[in-house]
Every structure is written in structure tokens, then in C-alpha cells.
Image: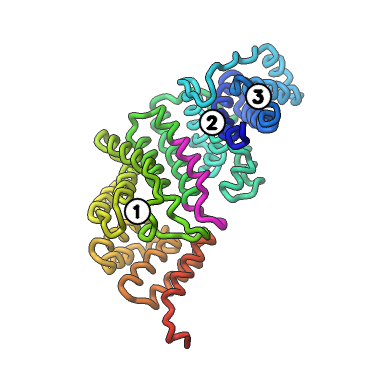
Amino acid sequence: MLAAQTEDLLRRLAPQVLGAVVRRYGNFDLAEDATQEALVAATAQWPRDGMPDNPKGWLITIAARRLTDLLRSDQARRRREDTVAQWANPKPQVSLPGETNPADLDDTLILLFMCCHQSLSVASQIALTLRAVGGLSTAEIARALLVPEGAVTRRITRAKRSIKDSGIPFAPPSATERAGRLDAVLRVLYLIFNEGYASTTGPELQRAEVASEAIRLARTVHMALPQDSEVTGLLALLLLTHARHRARTGPDGSLIPMSEQDRTLWDPEAIAEGVSLITDALPRGPTGPYQVQAAIAAVHDEAPSSELTDWPQIVALYEVLLGIDRNPVVALNHAVAVAMVRGPQAGLDLLADLESDTRVNDDRRFHAVRGHLLEMVGDRQAARETYEAAARRATNLRQQRYLHARAAHLVDPLSTGD
């Protein structure tokens, strides 16, 4: 088996193995460590010795043995060691690689809700979700989030300690608990996707593998809760947005705005699936922000060009979204859509209302949009200065270069003596 296939299989099996070990032995903290060590052992042994007949059963057995070793190594836990010694190893699983049975799905969903418990910070929720459910190593998470490995280790350690101290059981949340924690689960998946699709830091504009992982996890939640309109809306939104990722950057990694993208590079299968999902979800209601954002993404994806985009419909959808979730980023996007329908000055008038909003007035996106609209009305000097202001606030190197290039494009040759 190729290393990439092994890695993909292990990533899919990781939450199932962890769920089985936690379900049987409790102790999320040590079970997570034991599962990670089993995954590492598989990474080393399978490419060399061949994949076992029952990969999942092999991993569970190794993780269970390692869990016992961890307990034995802790003198203060000798009493629990005696208990563990009496436990029988779990029966081998009969599922074939790639198959998903209801128990696997339940365990994965329980893990997701556990990792997104309200007692954890958002940063810890993201790190723990990628580790426990995504099957990523600490080093992979550090690379994905562009933070030092030590910081990831501390986040995960704190998160596991919080789970242990809070006494959260490894069990499906009640209907009330699930409703209260589902928003956190969806928010974490949305944040993971955004970090992959539009990296906030680092040399690259996007990291497709992180975005793909968020889609895989969202698909898992959707399999468990197919009738939840917002779960469906989130999956549709991620698919419809990710469908454009191949066209977002040029051969040198530079940013290509949507209006200039080669739409033949967009993924038609992802668009078709996303459109089908959101078309199915919207009539079921109640309508939430992920569904409306997915509907906006669908309008963009179905347009043959920027000029032929149904901008009036997008304006209307953003106004619905503002009614549900009135935040400055939505207002910013609404101003862009209004500018496309009523002209750039109408968009600038809306931006004037946001200038006093401290949540967005020092953000790179606010200045980039303002620069774009100033360029559209023909105020080249103000546009250039605003693009430069946006570049100073950008933390991603590719975004900085794009904004500097926009500013440089507006320099009057006569004013420089060229």
C-alpha cells in the first residue's frame, strides 16, 4: 500500500479507533495518547510489512496494549491498572477499510461534540478536533495552523485536562445538549475550512488539505444529521467555496480575484453536489446563516462570468443574512454586492457607515474593498493609498504582494518622472 493511501486510511480510522478505546476504557486523555501511538506504529509498520487483514482491529489492539502500558507506568494509578488488567481486549472489528457502520459514525460524532465542548477555548477546540477526529499529528496541526508545535501541544494538553476535569462522559449528548453544542461544532469546522481556504498567515494563500479535512468532517456530521438544515447548509457552503480553489492562484501562487478566474478550473462535481444540498435544505428551514451563505456561493458558482452574475439576487440574499447575523464582515460583503448593482459610490456610502466600527475598520478586508471601490470611481490616488493601508494590515505574504501590486498599478507615470 502506498504511503499516501496508508495515511488516508489512518486518518479515516483514527476517530473510530479512539472512539472504540474511549468507549471501552474511558479516560479520554490516555486513550488519545495511546491511539496516536498506534497510528504512529502503523505508519512505520504497514508500508514495510504490509497492511493487516483487519486494520481497525489491529489499531484498537495496539492502542489498548499501549493504554495498559501507560497506566502501568503511573504508580499513582496502580489500582486502575488492576481494573484494566481484567478488561478483555476488544473484539476485532469486521468492517473493511473505507466502510462506515453506524457505530463508527456515532463514535465520530460523539468525539466531535466532546472536542467542541463549551468548556474549551475555540483555539483548543480546533486543535483537539484536528488531533482526535481528524487524525493529524501534533506536527501536522502545527503546520496547518502555522503555530509552533509547543503551542499546539499545550492547547491539546489543556483541552484534555479540561475534558478530564469536567467529567464529560463518552456518550451521545442528549437532544438538548446536542442542540446547544451543534453550533460550536459547525463553527469549528467553518473556522478550520476558512484557515485552509484563505490562510491568515504564512507564505501561501490556501492550504487545500486543511480545507478538505474540514469538508470530510462536515460530511461526517451531515451523514449523522442529514435532516438538519444548517448542517446541510454548512456542507454545501464548504463544497461550493472549495470548488473554486484551483482557480484562485496562478502558477506562481499569486492571488487571482474571482472576477478574473478561469471558471473552467472550477470543480463541476463539487458545485453540483453543493447546489443539490442547498436546494434541498432551504425549503426545510428554519433558515440559518450557513444556508444563506451557501445560497450566495451557489449564485456565484452558477454564473458564467462575473458580469453575468445575478448580483441583485446576491444583494437580496445578503440583506437576508444581515437580518439573521448582522456582523461587519457580512455588511462589508453586502457593500460590494450593492456596488455591483447600483455603482461603486453606493458601495462607498455603505462603507462610510462601517468606518466607526472597531470590529472591522482596522481589518485588511475593509481597506481592500474600499480601495477597490475607490478605483472603480476613478480616484486613483485615494485607491492607491487605501490599497497600501490594506497591505500593511495583511498577515499573509501573498495577500500583501497582491495589494502592493494593486497600489503600484495605480501610480501615475507622470508623477514618478518615468
In the picture of the structure, the residue carrying the numbered disc 1 is: 330
Q: Residues within 10 Å of mark 3 (few under 14, many from 20)?
A: many
Q: Nearer the viewer, mark 3 or mark 2?
A: 2
User: Which image quarter holds the N terminus?
Assistant: top right
**Which label number is shown at residue 376?**
none
Q: Determine whether 289 is above or below 260 in the image.
A: above
**Vertical position of residue 161 compared to residue 79: above or below:** below
Residue under numbered circle 2: 12
Residue 396 place in picture, x, y as percent: 52, 59
> How far is disc 1 from disc 2 in space, using C-alphas?
34 Å
Q: Secondary structure at mark 3?
A: helix
Circle 3/circle 2 CB separation < 8 Å: no
**Residue depicted at x 73% and y 23%:** 69
Percent position (x, y) of residue 318?
29, 52
Q: Bounds of the magenta span?
A: 198-218
The type of residue carrying mark 2 is Arg
Q: Is residue 157 above or below residue 196?
A: above
